[in-house]
Amino acid sequence: KLPPLLKREFQTATFNGVSRELHQPTLRIMQWNLLAQALSQGEDNFVLCPEEALAWNNRKLHILEELLTYNATILCLEEVDCFDYLQQNLADAGYSGIFLPKPDSPCLYSAHCVGPDGCALFWRSDEVTQIFQKGIVLHDDDGQETNQVALLCRFTLKELKKEFYVVVTHLKSKTPFWQLRHEQGKYLEKVLSEVTVDFPVIICGDFNAEPNEKVYQVFRESIMDLGSAYCHLSPQEEEPSFTTWKIRGGTHGKNKEVAHCIDYIWYSRSELRPISLLKFPSEDEIGKDRLPSLSYPSDHLSLVVDFGFIKHLQETD
Ligand code: NDP
Ligand code: CA
């Protein structure tokens, strides 16, 4: 029997020192690299993770539970190599979704391949109407297509009749590729700043980059006037110390532990205000063998943020 999923709580922003419950409808966004099944059992080499935790029949239950627990309006997902499973099961909960595989997914070369991985975007059809979608293959500085992608959608929030864009992306992995990530980020930022002029934008992703990388600055300094939601809602305006925490096997039996912040939810500061966020578990709650585990199906934690539309908040204050 599978132990329960890691329990996490929401933290609501305080205004003038007072936490204020909002009664206005908000937009809940989840960002999550849910860990490709093919990579979890191969490439990734999570040596301390029990085998049962990586078995698909167990993982698929916790993945679905994580996706359904917070009842987000929109789910932005990376490393999805199980789109059919998600589409079938999330449809029962009222979600529609789209998927864009990476051009040459590393999952295709894994012994545990179940299909290519890519980015997926799901939305609650009772809360939003999807009115536009675009798949983007990220280019490098030479104008060449890379193996990384993004998905862009425009929605209307039915209750407020507000329109907005949501983007999901997954930049090139591994530390030495910081330059390629920078190029991919510049390309994405340019495309988005041209397309999303009319409405606010929310950009979710596994950027594979800590806040000190150049690609982070590309979004921080974008003409789209973006803020990073977890950073904005933290007391010191700092990014979290980790969004992923894992131990991989290394050479000579030396394991490598990595805990760092590489996942973000960017938003248009002039029109959206982050109201609350899903807190991360403590080191003890994560456990000494880190992630993934029997209590959590990915090495990345989900980020969940509630946004209010500033204009509407002022009107109803
Ligand atoms: P990336 O480096 O961007 O993606 C690698 C994926 O593997 C990411 O999802 C990454 O996760 C994950 N990953 C697994 N193990 C590790 C690890 N130890 N360190 C870091 N990340 C890890 O690669 P590309 O998409 O550019 O694909 C690689 C290319 O390699 C493809 O074009 C393919 O042709 C080729 N390939 C060929 C193989 C072959 O056998 N011929 C095998 C594999 C790939 P995260 O983002 O969370 O870090
Ligand atoms: Ca990964």
Image (cartoon, rainbow, N blue to C red):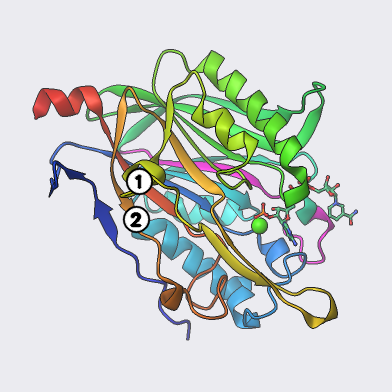
Q: Residue furthest left?
A: 317
- State the image coordinates of residue 34 (x, y, percent, origin top left): 56, 57
Magenta stretch: give its range: 108-126
- State the image coordinates of residue 20 (x, y, percent, origin top left): 13, 45
Residues at circles 1 and 2 in contact by the CB criterion of under 8 Å: yes
Mark earlier in primary sequence (1, 2):
2
Tell whether 26 sits left or right of 185: left
Quarter of the rendering containing residue 280: bottom left
Work out whether 77 lies above or below 296. Answer: above
Q: What residue sits 58% from the left and 73% below the top?
A: 57
67 or 147, nearer to the observer:
147
The residue that disc 2 covers is 278
Is 90 colored magenta in this rendering? no
Q: Quadrant of the C terminus?
A: top left
Quarter of the rendering containing residue 54: bottom right
- State the image coordinates of residue 303 (x, y, percent, origin top left): 43, 52
For label 1, the crowd category at 10 Å Cα-Cα, with few meaning under 14, some 14 to 19 and many 20 or more, is many
Work out whether 257 lies above or below 214. Answer: below
Q: Which mark is residue 305?
A: 1
